[in-house]
Image: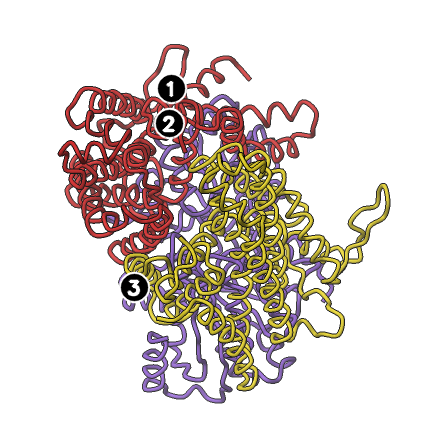
């Protein structure tokens, strides 16, 4: 394998990591602040992708679609928080698991009812289509560079929001001690609604941005949910920095594993067997990574030590 | 409002009466449905031991369910094809004897649970949830891409195993076996709950320091509970493989783990017959709604949502008067 | 089911009588919910359309949703066999579900007509007198792709498929008829959504053409990402990623791609015209390959029911094997292992007005028999 291919795969890994960061930022926020295991996170991802595809098809503008994705996922988030999640705060966490599991079914089949059973069309906007030559002789798709940029901007935005705004102070306080900030007169219900809607809006935005490169179909959110959980658990729950580093780690491990393992096995196995074994092992890699991290750091890389 | 004990008895009686009536009336599929409920209830009883009593929310019990299933599938398919399972160092033939297969499935599931548990129990809370998921996913992807036993296509073996004196292909006989094993598991759960071990386990969940002060190591208690839990779920997986005469990686998927958790929450976490109530409601709804509308999962989701919003402590919690569980 | 009731009543009113016809009860198990629902819905709609057009009121259909889960499919099959007493089972889309259901159903004396999935295990040693594949044998379209790639002058192929049995069968099928050199081979992960790494490997290879089998959403993702990558090697694949149901989602990225299929809407014969026009009129969309396969399956069944009583298993099987119906594919017959002997075409994705669809370029394999027929001792 040539050096430039290796470099390109590293870039691909970083790019996939940024996609994963987009997918998991909302989840880690909701999880960290509210302690809520939101299994329906992938459904909001799907809602974002469908809203973007629907609006982009109707208006011809991808960027209007992005706005629609944000809005649709945020509105759905506010509704879900007020109608369902809010009633479950004083319950066992497991009740929230069941409720969000039920929401997956409702959202998936509701979407299928509205949009039909066939995948929707959503393509890269003309402005960001095509490929550019990078130094080192690599042609790289513009849209993927835009994804990296979007992930970077989101990371900066979230660091700023959590670290330097009034809302951020409340969010951090909420993570640390929810009774205390309630006692200090912060409207905790409103804070939770805002945080939840922010989390779902981020999921929707990710659905629109990443969904553009994928198939916009019912059920597209389910693998996202698992990947996002892997990312935030490796990084440490509630930590934006952890989510970012976890996402990049997972992205690099997955992409490099898929391209390097078959080559490595080819050294001592016949080629087609090496391919099969190598790619089988590659699909386990990120779970091995997660198990490995947790065995040595039971709270993830950047997690505070708590249950 | 009724006492939980009577509710449990009524539930178990209903689960027995319905298939017997169906047998009299000649409706064999009702028996198959009841068998599925009994098997999933059994799997969930296993999980309930870890989750309900020990507070160990495992999102990876599909691993044990699937491993139990594959033990049956692999050995039975070797037996059906007259190919020995092992030729070296000693020749081991496949078998279709349930009385041999069940203990093997339990043993293998217990070993897998011991390995996963030993590593996973170093973590707690959400990290425990996710590390158990990780191990199950590893097994899932392994099963999908490992060609010897069918990979993603799964492994059909056409006929159920043999049980002395019974025709296991007869739905009511097979139901009887599953129901009996469910009762054994419920009895075990009940005994463990009341025994020193159950107290230690609940203690380890509520107040690990105090338990430690009593000279009990919470890690060991939890690990033992996790192994037992995995073994019971493995047995259920073995029965499910026999019910379908087929195993596939789908049994190992995270959806299966999720479904088992949902059954327990639906019925009532930590309740003796919670898994039975949960499995009954879940699969009956799935069966009835499935025939009504193409979008039945939408209504299924809404009903689950209503149960969680309006039935505190699951079905058993909502119906039973005495609060035996916190 | 409600749709059913309405349809049978409707069929009863329309029935002009088709001569001698025994009653047949059909159990259709197919995917009607979740991400794969589009395929099952098309299979069902094609099947029901044929019954409606023929006024076949002697054929009763029960339809159930398998949720794309093998265990659910097995239980539905048990239900249909034990409680509904169906004579014939059909409708399964996915190979892994077929493997779970078909051997058990045929062993219990039921007839299974495959509208799509036809894994190699059921075509060779595992063939059964009660099992008929009306669609193809799973390898067929991949074999045709191999033959086409050779013909099109691709000498260094890069091939990829997911790492599961159907994926391996696909690459083997391609190789069986491909005479050039395979310079790269990748097994992707099942359900994978990002293909940047694979595309980079393709770019770095010296390939002059790509064969890929990535069914469903995986193919949509791959083709979209490939189109944006700047790599411009020709793509060849089986019909699945370029079928009517999903072409709209792939978009212009699919334009010009060559894909292999045993059917297309522009095959010129009366039956196909009736089918395509009828489907468009009834459901307001163009039919897919799955709809065509469902339609042919129903017509095969109608033809057999006119010749023999389903209770006469031998006679009914013989009637099925004659395949005496007007297939939308033109000529159609069954081989020794009861899989089709048929022509397989290469199609090109084109735009008709605003609608993406396929047109046939040429047949690549004529009267093609699958590779497993010889292993079947029936």
Alpha carbon of mark 3 to alpha carbon of mark 2: how far? 36 Å
Regarding mark 2 in the picture, which secondary structure is present there?
loop
- Count of all numbered marks drawn on residues in the image: 3
Q: Residue at x 43, y 69 (%)?
A: B284
Answer yes or no: do the residues labelled 2 and 1 have beta carbons within 8 Å? yes
Which chain is painted in purple? C
- Left/right placement of residue B53 relative to residue C42 reads right
Letter of the chain that mark 1 sits on in the rendering: A
The label number, if any, that marks residue C190 in the structure image? none
Tag on residue A139? 1
What is the C-alpha distance between the residues marked 1 and 3?
A: 43 Å
The extreme top residue here reads A135
In the rendered image, what is the letter of the chain coloured yellow? B
| Residue drawn at (35%, 24%) of the image | A244
- Any idea which chain is the red one in this picture? A
- Residue denoted by label 3: C280
Residue B16: quadrant of the picture: bottom right
- Give the chain of mark 3: C
Quadrant of residue A122 in the image? top left
Q: Residue furthest front?
A: B214
Q: Where is residue C108 in the image (x, y as percent from the top left)?
A: 64, 74
| Residue A213 left/right relative to A252 | left
Which x, y percent locates residue B255? 46, 50
Residue C229 image label: 2
Label 1: which secondary element: strand
């Amino acid at each position: 394998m040539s050096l430039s291919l290796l470099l390109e795969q590293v870039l691909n890994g970083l790019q996939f990591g940024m996609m994963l960061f987009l997918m998991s930022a909302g989840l880690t926020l909701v999880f960290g602040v509210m302690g809520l295991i939101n299994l329906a996170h992938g459904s909001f991802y799907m809602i974002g992708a469908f809203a973007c595809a629907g609006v982009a098809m109707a208006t011809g503008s991808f960027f209007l679609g992005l706005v629609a994705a944000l809005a649709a996922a945020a509105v759905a988030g506010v509704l879900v928080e007020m109608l369902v999640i809010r009633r479950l705060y004083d319950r066992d966490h497991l009740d929230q698991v069941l409720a969000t599991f039920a929401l997956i079914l409702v959202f998936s089949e509701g979407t299928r009812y509205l949009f039909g059973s066939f995948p929707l069309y959503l393509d890269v906007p003309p402005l960001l289509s095509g490929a550019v030559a990078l130094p080192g002789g690599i042609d790289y798709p513009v849209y993927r560079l835009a994804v990296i940029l979007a992930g970077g901007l989101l990371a900066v935005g979230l660091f700023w929001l959590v670290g330097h705004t009034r809302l951020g102070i409340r969010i951090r306080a909420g993570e640390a001690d929810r009774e205390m900030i309630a006692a200090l007169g912060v409207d905790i219900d409103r804070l939770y609604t805002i945080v939840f809607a922010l989390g779902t809006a981020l999921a929707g935005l990710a659905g629109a941005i990443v969904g553009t490169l994928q198939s916009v179909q019912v059920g597209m959110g389910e693998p996202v949910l698992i990947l996002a959980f892997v990312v935030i658990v490796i990084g440490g729950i509630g930590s934006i920095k952890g989510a970012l580093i976890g996402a990049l780690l997972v992205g690099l491990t997955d992409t490099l594993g898929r391209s390097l393992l078959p080559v490595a096995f080819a050294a001592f196995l016949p080629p087609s067997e090496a391919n099969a074994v190598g790619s089988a092992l590659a699909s386990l890699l990120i779970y091995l990574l997660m198990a490995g991290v947790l065995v040595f750091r039971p709270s993830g890389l950047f997690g505070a030590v708590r249950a | 409002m009724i006492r939980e004990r009577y509710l449990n008895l009524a539930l178990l009686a209903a689960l027995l009466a319905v298939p017997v009536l169906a047998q009299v009336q000649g409706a064999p599929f009702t028996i198959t449905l009841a068998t599925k409920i009994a098997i999933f209830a059994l799997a969930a009883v296993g999980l309930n031991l870890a989750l309900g009593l020990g507070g160990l929310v495992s999102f990876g019990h599909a691993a044990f369910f699937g491993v139990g299933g594959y033990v049956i599938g692999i050995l039975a398919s070797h037996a059906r094809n007259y190919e020995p399972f092992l030729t070296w160092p000693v020749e081991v033939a496949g078998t279709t004897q349930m009385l041999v297969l069940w203990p093997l499935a339990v043993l293998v599931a217990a070993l897998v649970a011991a390995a996963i548990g030993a590593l996973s129990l170093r973590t707690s809370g959400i990290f425990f949830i996710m590390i158990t998921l990780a191990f199950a996913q590893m097994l899932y992807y392994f099963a999908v891409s490992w060609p010897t036993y069918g990979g993603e296509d799964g492994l059909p073996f056409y006929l159920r195993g043999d049980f002395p004196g019974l025709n296991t292909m007869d739905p009511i006989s097979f139901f009887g076996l599953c129901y009996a094993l469910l009762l054994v598991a419920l009895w075990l759960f009940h005994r463990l709950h009341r025994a020193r071990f159950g107290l230690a386990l609940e203690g380890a969940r509520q107040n690990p320091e105090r338990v430690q002060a009593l000279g009990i190591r919470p890690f060991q208690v939890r690990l033992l509970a996790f192994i037992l839990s995995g073994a019971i779920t493995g047995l259920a997986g073995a029965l499910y493989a026999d019910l379908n005469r087929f195993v596939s990686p789908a049994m190992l998927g995270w959806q299966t783990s999720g479904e088992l958790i949902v059954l327990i929450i639906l019925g009532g976490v930590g309740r003796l017959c919670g898994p039975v109530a949960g499995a009954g409601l879940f699969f009956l709804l799935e069966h009835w709604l499935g025939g009504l509308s193409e979008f039945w999962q939408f209504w299924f989701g809404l009903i689950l949502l209503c149960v969680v919003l309006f039935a505190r402590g699951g079905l058993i919690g909502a119906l039973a008067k005495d609060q035996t569980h916190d | 089911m409600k749709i059913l009731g309405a349809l049978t009543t409707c069929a009863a009113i329309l029935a002009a009588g088709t001569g001698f016809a025994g009653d047949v009860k059909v159990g259709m198990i197919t995917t009607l919910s979740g991400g794969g629902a589009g395929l099952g819905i098309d299979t069902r709609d094609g099947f029901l359309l044929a019954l409606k057009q023929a006024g076949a009121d002697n054929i009763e259909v029960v339809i159930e949703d398998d949720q794309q889960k093998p265990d659910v499919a097995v239980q539905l099959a048990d239900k249909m066999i034990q409680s509904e007493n169906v004579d014939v089972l059909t409708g399964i889309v996915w190979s892994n579900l077929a493997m779970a259901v078909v051997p058990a159903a045929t062993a219990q004396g039921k007839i299974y007509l495959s509208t799509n999935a036809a894994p190699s295990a059921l075509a060779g040693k595992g063939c059964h007198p009660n099992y008929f594949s009306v669609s193809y044998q799973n390898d067929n379209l991949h074999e045709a792709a191999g033959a086409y790639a050779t013909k099109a002058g691709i000498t260094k192929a890069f091939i990829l498929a997911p790492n599961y049995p159907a994926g391996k069968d696909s690459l083997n099928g391609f190789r069986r008829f491909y005479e050039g050199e395979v310079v790269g081979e990748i097994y992707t992960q099942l359900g994978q959504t990002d293909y940047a790494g694979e595309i980079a490997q393709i770019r770095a290879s010296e390939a002059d053409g790509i064969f890929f089998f990535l069914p469903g959403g995986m193919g949509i993702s791959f083709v979209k990402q490939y189109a944006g990558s700047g790599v411009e090697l020709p793509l060849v694949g089986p019909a699945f990623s370029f079928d009517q149901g999903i072409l709209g989602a792939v978009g212009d990225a699919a334009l010009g791609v060559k894909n292999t299929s045993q059917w297309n809407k522009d095959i010129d014969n009366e039956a196909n015209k009736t089918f395509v026009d009828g489907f468009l009129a009834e459901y307001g969309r163009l039919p897919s390959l799955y709809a065509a396969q469902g339609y042919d399956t129903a017509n095969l069944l109608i033809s057999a029911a006119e010749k023999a009583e389903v209770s006469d298993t031998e006679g009914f099987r013989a009637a099925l094997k004659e395949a005496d119906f007007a297939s939308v594919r033109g000529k159609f017959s069954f081989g020794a292992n009861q899989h089709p002997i048929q022509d397989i075409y290469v199609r090109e994705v084109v735009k008709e007005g605003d609608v993406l669809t396929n047109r046939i370029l040429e047949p690549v394999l004529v009267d093609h028999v699958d590779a497993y027929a010889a292993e079947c001792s029936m």
